[in-house]
Amino acid sequence: MRIVIAGGHGQIALRLERLLSARGDEVAGIIRRAEQGDDLRAAGAEPVLLDLESASVEEVAALLQGADAAVFAAGAGPGSGTARKETVDKGAAVLFADAAVRAGVRRFVVVSSMGADPAHRGDDVFDVYLRAKGEADAYVTGQSTLDWTILRPGSLTDAPGTGLVRLEAHTGRGAVSRDDVAAVLAELVDTSATAGLTLELIGGSTPVTVAVKSVAGN
C-alpha cells in the first residue's frame, strides 16, 4: 500500500511510519519543516514538505494522488494556543479530508482524542482542542465518499508498548502508550471493515490484531 500521513513528524506518526515501512508499505509523511526530513527517512518514510495551515486543497490532493490510504495524525501540539487548535486540529483535518475526496482516496483514518465533541463547552485551551477535534471528526464522518475510521486514544504515554489494548466504541477513561496507538493504526489502515466506526482506545488485555478484528466483525 501507499499511505500518506499528515503530521508526519508527530510522535505517533513516526512510530506508525516505522511499522508500515517495516512491513513493506510505501509511506509518505507531510511535514512543515525541512529539518524534520531526516527523522522520517530514518523511520523509512518519504518526507513531503507542505504546511497544511496554508496549503490549498489542490496542493494536498496532488500529494494524495495514487495513495491507497490517508492518515490524519497532525496536531497543534502542547503549548499551542487556541488559534492553532482551530487551524490545525480542525482546519487541517477538514482540508486533508477534502483533498482525499478530490484525489479519490477512500480509506481515511483520523487520530482524534477521547472526549472530542463539537458541543464541548468551555474556553480553556483544552476545551477548544476537544471542540476542534470533535468538529473535525463530525466533518470527516459526513463525507460519504470516504471509508473513514476515527480513533480516539485515551491519555498518551511514552511507556513501551505491550501490544495489548482495549478497543471499543466506548472504553471509559484510561491511558495507552503511543507505541500501541501506532500498532492499532497500522492494523486499521488496511482493515477496511472498520470503516464507519468511531473507536476509543486504552491499554487492555487483548492483542492488537485480535482487537481490530473484533471491532471489524471478524
Image: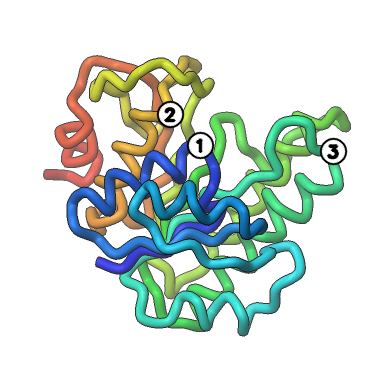
Nearer mark to the viewer, of 1 and 2:
1
Q: Quadrant of the N terminus?
A: bottom left
Residue 37 shows in the view: yes
Asked if the residue under mark 2 is in contact with the one under mark 1, i.e. CB atoms within 8 Å, the reply is: yes
Query: Is residue 92 toward the left or the right of residue 110 in the image?
Result: right
Residue at point 46%, 20% (across, down) = 158
Residue 39 is situated, as x and y percent measured from the top left of the image, at 48, 47
Q: Residue at x 67, y 64 (%)?
A: 52
Decide which of 101, 163 is in the foreground and name it: 163
Secondary structure under tag 2 reads helix
Q: Residues within 10 Å of mark 2 (few under 14, many from 20)?
A: many
Q: Quadrant of residue 211?
A: top left
Give me the residue at 88% from left, 32% from top: 123
What is the crowding at mark 3: few (fewer than 14 residues within 10 Å), some, or many (at least 20)?
A: some
Specify the amino acid type for callout 1: Gln
Upstream in the sequence, badge 2 or badge 3? 3
CA gap between label 1 and label 2 equals 7 Å
Q: Label 3, on which residue?
A: 81
Residue with the mark numbered 1: 11
Inter-mark Cα distance, 3 to 1: 20 Å
Looking at the rendered structure, the secondary structure element under dot 1 is: helix
Q: Residue 22, percent across and down?
A: 22, 49
Q: Is residue 46 left or right of residue 190?
A: right
Which x, y percent locates residue 84? 80, 48
Instruction: Indicate which disc residue 54 carries.
Output: none
Q: Is residue 174 left or right of residue 69?
A: right
